Amino acid sequence: MTKTIPLTAAQALVRWLAVQMTEDGERFIEGVWAIFGHGNVAGLGEALHGIGDRLPTWRGQNEQTMAHAAIAFAKTKRRRKAMAVTSSIGPGATNMVTAAALAHVNRLPVLLIPGDIFANRRPDPVLQQIEDFDDGTISANDAFRPVVRYFDRISRPEHLLTALPRALGVMTDPANCGPVCVAFCQDVQAEAYDYPAAFFEPKVWRIRRPLPDLSEVDAVADLIRAAKKPVIVAGGGVIYSGAEHTLAGFAHRHRIPFVETQAGKGANSWEHDLNFGSPGVTGSECANEICAAADLVIGIGTRFQDFTTGSWTVFGNEARKLVSINLHGYDALKHGATGIVGDARATIEQLSAALGSHTAPEPDLGPRAAWHAKVAEVTAAPGAAGNVAPTDAQVIGAVQRVATKDSIVMCAAGTMPGALQVLWQAAQGGYHMEYGYSCMGYEVAGAMGIKLAAPEKEVICFVGDGSYMMANSELATAVMRRVPFTVVLTDNRGYGCINRLQIDCGGAGFNNLYKDCAVEDLPEIDFVAHARSMGAHAEKASGISDLEVRIAAARGRTKPTVIVIDTDPVPGTDAGGHWWDVAVPEVGGPERLEAARERYATNARNQRSFD
């Protein structure tokens, strides 16, 4: 006779999650971020209280930013561990939709458990319930369907027996990895069921390493042998595969230069002699030059996002061919690529074996040295007669000069992601950027998630005043949990990044910087006082040299430090870069728009796909 255990559905869920293990003998779901409401407090909330430290629960301030922290944790753990996030029904649930989209775009695992409506429908419509006039099965949680990899609704207790293994199967699948939503009807959370005892036996989830098809490997090896100017575009898949050293060795052995995307940056140190930096819109000059001349582009673990490709204007060689190595056929076959479907590390190893002693023609390393000299120039501290408010590049230089091999810099949106990609000289493993979704508000919560995943590292968060204003409340959570990291808050009094884009596209300065907005009084926001009010150590740097001193001093603290510095919103990086396809109005408007449209049309004619 099968042994059973009587539990509520919520108790069964948390008991099952607590025994899902990694190959290293740790919980795969490290814990649960929770804000309780009427959709989850009585059922799931009581179950989480009952299980205690076997599955820890942490309280956040906002459902979206809790999920951002969980996503940053999973990214730092290279998708080998994850977190869960639970909310009430209604606005608590839909707050997480943005975070789900972020995780989906970045291929990162997070388990979202929003409360849902009553399965029995007796009290309908309940508080916060979205009613579809034409479909009685719809709830607010159906908004998750387009932005998760797997969606399920638990409307009977026994649904957990199939839903939970499917959920973690997706989260641990290297090709389909992404966010999962298990919507949990609130009455079902409290219902009892006799669950098989075997369901709660510990299970180890192993991350597969799919091997490539040898015929695909041979086809790509032939293309590499025939290429005169090959280049590798290394994406985040290199890091998730643990292929950093394998890629570095492959590049050396076959003398193929490589560039790194936002997600792939930091896979190898900037000092690697064949690392030409980043390509595309926010790329280095030497990377874009080598990509423009390439006759074979070898993507490894990259989606070929428009920033990477300069909206498909970077790869200018008429004889160009495209190779894409990726775990998912969808990505491997984009843009008419010759694809290899397989794990990055395993594929690089087999490709190297197929190439044998073959080496590509020696690349010209001169542009790489010239680029590093240019970076040093634009990031140098201003002299005695320098600019009053420093540029973002100068702020980056200040942080760079005091950073160590144990520093991780992170960001997500605004000016700094592009500036950091083009200028930051990353140590191996020292770069964390959410730029797949470029989500404002990820920064502070993400910094906390990184530090929770890598407590031995120094985490330095770059955030602009606009993004800080959008989501800063998890700073209080980090204070409460004593999670130390350093926030460098650059105050340019508005959305400086989009203001520059607006001007570059021929527009007038409008509704981005506070001075160009419809306001009666220009705000004077005291970010130091605000951060202090949440318990952080906060101070204002008087300039670049003072910023360097304050960053070093923050290392000894046991709570977050916020360092505010005023910056000039007008200058860009003055280095690197490439065209980005942002459409300009075709007719109407003043002369400045006509000139911008002419520039746009000229660049658009250079767009070259591989299809």
Image (spheres, grey):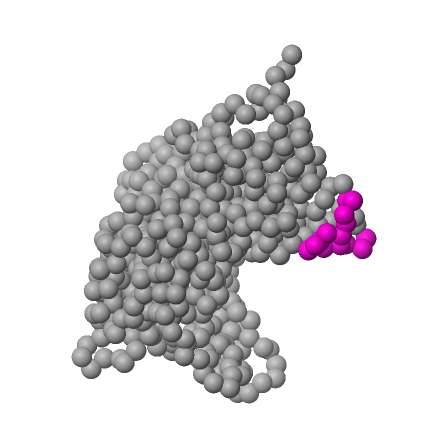
Q: Nearer the viewer, residue 192 or 587?
A: 192
- For the N terminus, give its image quadrant: top right
Quadrant of the rendered image containing residue 169: top right
> Relative to 165, is 308 above or below?
below
For image coordinates 52% across by 47% down, the residue present is 34
Q: Return the x and y of residue 420 as percentages of the image width and height.
A: 35, 61
Which is more toward the observer, 478 or 388?
A: 478
Dominant secondary-structure state across the stretch colored magenta:
loop
Q: Is residue 508 left or right of residue 379?
A: right
Q: Nearer the viewer, residue 185 or 607?
A: 185
Q: Quadrant of residue 443?
A: bottom left
Residue 562 counted in the magenta span: no
Q: Which residues are magenta?
A: 121-134
In the rendered image, residue 220, in percent from the top left (x then y), is placed at 44, 40
Q: Residue at left 52%, top 39%?
A: 49
Q: Position of residue 549 (x, y in %)?
A: 21, 64
Of residue 111 and residue 347, the one placed in the foreground of this image is: 111
44 lies left or right of 116 = left
**Is residue 122 part of the magenta span, yes or no?**
yes
Answer yes or no: is residue 311 visible. yes
Asked where in the image residue 542 lies, by quadrant, the reply is bottom left
At a point 73% along the width and 41% down the height, the residue shown is 119
Observer able to see residue 236? no
The relative height of residue 109 versus residue 604 in the rendered view (above or below) is above
| Residue at x-position 52% and y-position 35% | 50
